[in-house]
């Protein structure tokens, strides 16, 4: 490590060279001036996006002038090209936005394109002052009896990062293909995608360990030690991780599933290593629930075998209406609501004889459990309209008040017969 | 901070959508002004410092060329560092606060690397390369002529200095070391190394496995042993060859084919493979370079024997010894150039030459006034013999540099010859054609 740091600090010695400083000064000056010009709108006719190309042109002219004077300009040109590349990446944003959803685009840019570009640029700059092969063989230390060089570690980190970040799209693509071929449900597709990612990441980590030269015996020994550590130290984390894997295989909690949580239907958004992310429609809240909660506690789901939910609204009708007519009207009304499924057919029931009304229940089926509240509202409105149209009264509760007298034997009705 | 500022600047141009809300702009403006001031100061600091020379470390950047058969490994880097850091440490006693940064580059990529780095003003201060590479770099205008007085040159072999002069008469580099080509043998299996080509073939007939490689650099010594060197010189110079010359070249090629037909002579596609087989104990004899002796010694211990390459009947072997020189990069600051020159002159003084060469026993000093104790070391004695053997190949080495396009063509021809695809007579005609076709 000391050797690597010495190598890096040694590059500072190049700043002793006036021609290097001149190139760096040129680049810094052009960048700062371009920034200032953009902020102050020195050229009001130009859109904001046109300022960096102007700066790049100025830098190009500066490099050309240096070359004309027979002075080195390769460093300034390289930095200019890197600026141009960065500008190009930002220009890519708009075309990519047409093809990718915002979240995917953000992930692609922030996790892959920009880091890859910055690493590539850094490597190009290092190539100007040193030799990769030479730096790569610098020894950093030992890991499990294996000598680790900078080159090996760098490659390992790049592979791990690419596996972690880059395995998403291929896994999603493969899961989509399998879904199309075998006719899997959306939940199964998401579960398969997640499991493929875990598999690729595991294989990637093992591959990196092998690349570093760590032998399998050492890995097994580490795994043994870790398992003891896991048992005592971070058992909750490990328990959640295992629960997550188990739930995926079991298929009870997968992205897209709808679970009841504290009386509210929630949709599973993501099954993570430690916790499951659920979305609650009622208040648009996202809930992070530890995986082991679903593993150990009872849960109600509407999406285990199918996604249909049977819903119900209650209504009261006056005693003088024929219950058979009311039941027929309720069933017909439910069928008119667009999001109520025709099959299984809606079913109305006479539940009880109440104090002021006969109580009915209308049961019907819906396709998306998350839409329950909205559809119930629609059904209730339709019932009100239908009852009004057919003259069916929804009675208010009625009470008759009497003036009380003492002793009770002297009590008479408010409506005593006329003398 | 400067980098952060620069990055902020670049990103700021391109991400107008990330502008802060109006309330945050005032403090940000103040911060931006501060950052501008700091970056300006950061820029000016070294400019001011370059006059005093105390702001930045006094670094001498040295690029070392690794030959084709040398893989850039931690071991190689360590070997170079062990050799040169000792010299650097002693140099610091006279020039304190001087640091060295060594970088190893493949010798055949050196021109390209130097071209790129010179374009950026980031070329190393010094290059430790083969003499012919220094000449190519000089001819490409990538190194400065080495400023040295006539009297100072008197310490070097006149012929070697002449070879280092570019067509304009300028010196491409300062000779520092001579790496020789030797024969390495396993003492436990072979009590006496073969001194002649015939003894080499006799040893194989007696059951000793020998190794050669199809790298012309490692086969060229046989040209001298078979007496074909004058003919080859003439062919390369473009002179017409008489029947005796043709006969001599055919003799070399015939010996090669004869050797390849021996049951216990293995011919490998490259030399590192032959060395690996030798280290593994599957070969008793190989040609080797003096620079690999420490690696071989580490593996084989006292079993490693070193001797000059076998001569022929009435002819001496013609190993290609590499003259390593220090050349001056073109991007150094005035102070950097002063340090580089001081270190170069320091490297060729007798005391440093002894440190560089006799300690590691991997090279001979270029300073001819440094006495090599041949009586006390068989290895040094073999190296001195090899250096003398190699003198006869000097003119050819000057005419055909390592990147000469004729070399791969000759190697292809030799490959076809040892695999029996061609006979020596036919191969001789083609060899002459190749050698006479100047690139």
Image: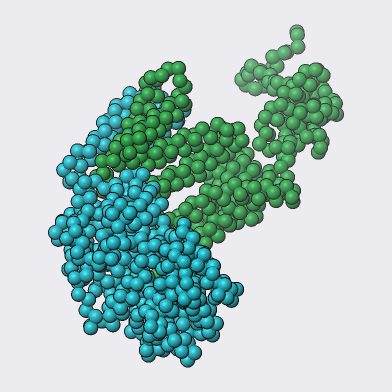
Tell me: B213 left or right of A398: left
Question: Which one is in front, B432 or A82?
Answer: B432
How many numbered discs, if any? 0
Extreme residue in the top direction: A419
Quarter residue B104 falls in: bottom left
Tell me: A114 left or right of B146: right
Query: Residue B412 location in percent, x, y?
Result: 53, 67
**Which colour represents chain A?**
green
Question: Which one is in front, A2 or B187?
Answer: B187
Query: Residue B263 location in percent, x, y?
Result: 54, 85
Query: Residue B116 location in percent, x, y?
Result: 39, 47
Q: Is residue B86 visible?
A: no
Q: The cyan chain is which one?
A: B
Residue at 55% x, 71% y: name it: B427
Residue at 17% x, 68% y: name it: B351
Q: Is residue A342 visible?
A: yes
The N terminus of chain A is located in which quarter?
bottom left
The C terminus of chain A is located in which quarter?
top right
Residue at 31% x, 74% y: name it: B387
Query: Residue A410 location in percent, x, y?
Result: 66, 18
Colour treatment of the image: by chain
Residue at 69% x, 14% y: name it: A414
Tell me: B414 left or right of A387: left
Up-down relation of residue B39 to residue A153 (above or below) = above
Question: Which one is in front, A372 or B409?
Answer: B409
């Amino acid at each position: 490590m000391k050797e690597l740091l010495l190598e890096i600090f040694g590059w500072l010695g190049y700043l002793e060279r006036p021609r290097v400083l001149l190139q760096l000064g040129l680049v810094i000056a052009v960048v700062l001036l371009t920034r200032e010009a953009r902020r102050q709108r020195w050229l009001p006719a130009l859109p904001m996006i046109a300022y960096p190309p102007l700066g790049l042109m100025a830098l190009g002219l500066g490099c050309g002038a240096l070359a004309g004077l027979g002075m080195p300009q390769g460093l300034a040109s390289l930095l200019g090209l890197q600026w141009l590349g960065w500008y190009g990446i930002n220009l890519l944003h708009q075309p990519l936005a047409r093809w990718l959803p915002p979240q995917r685009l953000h992930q692609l840019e922030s996790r892959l394109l920009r880091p890859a570009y910055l690493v590539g640029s850094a490597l190009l700059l290092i190539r100007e002052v040193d030799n990769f092969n030479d730096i790569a063989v610098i020894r950093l230390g030992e890991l499990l009896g294996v000598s680790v060089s900078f080159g090996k570690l760098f490659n390992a980190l790049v592979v791990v990062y690419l596996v972690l970040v880059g395995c998403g799209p291929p896994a999603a693509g493969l899961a989509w293909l399998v879904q199309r071929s075998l006719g899997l449900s959306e939940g199964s597709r998401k579960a398969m995608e997640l499991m493929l990612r875990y598999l690729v990441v595991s294989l990637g980590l093992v591959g990196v360990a092998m690349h570093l030269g760590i032998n399998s015996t050492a890995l097994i020994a580490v795994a043994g030690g870790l398992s003891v550590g896991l048992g005592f130290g971070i058992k909750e984390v490990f328990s959640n991780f295992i629960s997550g894997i188990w739930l995926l295989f079991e298929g009870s909690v997968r992205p897209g599933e709808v679970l009841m949580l504290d009386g509210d239907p929630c949709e599973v958004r993501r099954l993570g290593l430690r916790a499951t992310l659920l979305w609650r429609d009622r208040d648009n809240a996202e809930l992070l629930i530890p995986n082991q909660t679903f593993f150990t506690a009872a849960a109600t789901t509407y999406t285990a075998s199918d996604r249909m939910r049977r819903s119900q609204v209650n209504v009261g009708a006056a005693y003088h209406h024929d219950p058979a007519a009311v039941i027929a009207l309720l069933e017909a009304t439910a069928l008119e609501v667009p999001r109520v499924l025709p099959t299984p057919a809606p079913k109305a029931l006479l539940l009880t004889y109440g104090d002021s009304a006969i109580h009915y229940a209308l049961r019907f089926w819906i396709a998306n459990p998350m839409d329950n509240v909205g559809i119930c509202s629609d059904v209730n409105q339709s019932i009100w309209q239908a009852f009004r149209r057919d003259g069916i009264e929804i009675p208010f509760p009625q009470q008759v008040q009497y003036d009380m007298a003492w002793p009770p034997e002297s009590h008479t009705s408010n409506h005593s017969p006329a003398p | 901070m400067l980098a952060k500022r620069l990055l902020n600047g670049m990103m700021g141009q391109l991400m107008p959508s990330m502008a802060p809300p109006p309330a945050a702009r005032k403090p940000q403006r103040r911060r931006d002004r501060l950052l501008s001031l700091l970056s300006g100061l950061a820029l000016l600091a070294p400019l001011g410092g370059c006059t005093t020379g105390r702001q930045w470390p006094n670094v001498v950047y040295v690029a070392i060329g690794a030959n084709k058969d040398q893989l850039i490994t931690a071991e190689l880097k360590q070997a170079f560092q062990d050799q040169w850091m000792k010299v650097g440490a002693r140099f610091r006693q006279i020039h304190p606060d001087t640091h060295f940064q060594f970088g190893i580059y493949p010798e055949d990529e050196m021109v390209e690397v130097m071209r790129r780095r010179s374009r950026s003003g980031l070329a190393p201060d010094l290059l430790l390369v083969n003499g012919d590479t220094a000449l190519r770099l000089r001819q490409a205008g990538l190194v400065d002529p080495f400023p040295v007085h006539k009297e100072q040159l008197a310490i070097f072999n006149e012929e070697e200095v002449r070879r280092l002069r570019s067509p304009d008469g300028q010196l491409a580099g300062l000779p520092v070391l001579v790496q020789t080509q030797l024969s390495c043998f396993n003492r436990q299996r072979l009590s006496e190394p073969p001194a002649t080509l015939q003894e080499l073939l006799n040893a194989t007939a007696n059951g000793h496995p020998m190794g050669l490689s199809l790298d012309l650099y490692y086969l060229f010594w046989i040209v001298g042993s078979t007496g074909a060197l004058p003919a080859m010189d003439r062919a390369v110079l473009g002179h017409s060859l008489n029947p005796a010359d043709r006969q001599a070249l055919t003799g070399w090629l015939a010996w090669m084919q004869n050797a390849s037909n021996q049951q216990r002579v293995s011919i490998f596609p490259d030399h590192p493979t032959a060395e690996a087989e030798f280290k593994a104990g599957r070969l008793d004899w190989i040609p080797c370079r003096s620079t690999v002796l420490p690696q071989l010694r580490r593996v084989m211990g006292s079993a490693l024997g070193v001797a000059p390459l076998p001569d022929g009947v009435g002819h001496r072997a013609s190993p290609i010894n590499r003259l390593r020189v220090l050349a001056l990069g073109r991007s150094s600051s005035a102070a950097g150039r002063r340090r580089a020159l001081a270190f170069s002159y320091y490297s060729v003084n007798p005391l440093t030459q002894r440190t560089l060469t006799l300690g590691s026993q991997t090279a001979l000093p270029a300073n001819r006034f440094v006495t090599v104790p041949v009586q006390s070391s068989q290895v040094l004695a073999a190296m001195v013999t090899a250096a003398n053997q190699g003198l006869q190949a000097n003119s050819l080495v000057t005419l055909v540099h390592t990147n000469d396009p004729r070399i791969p063509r000759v190697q292809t021809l030799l490959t076809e010859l040892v695999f029996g695809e061609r006979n020596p007579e036919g191969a001789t005609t083609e060899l002459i054609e190749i050698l006479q076709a100047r690139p």
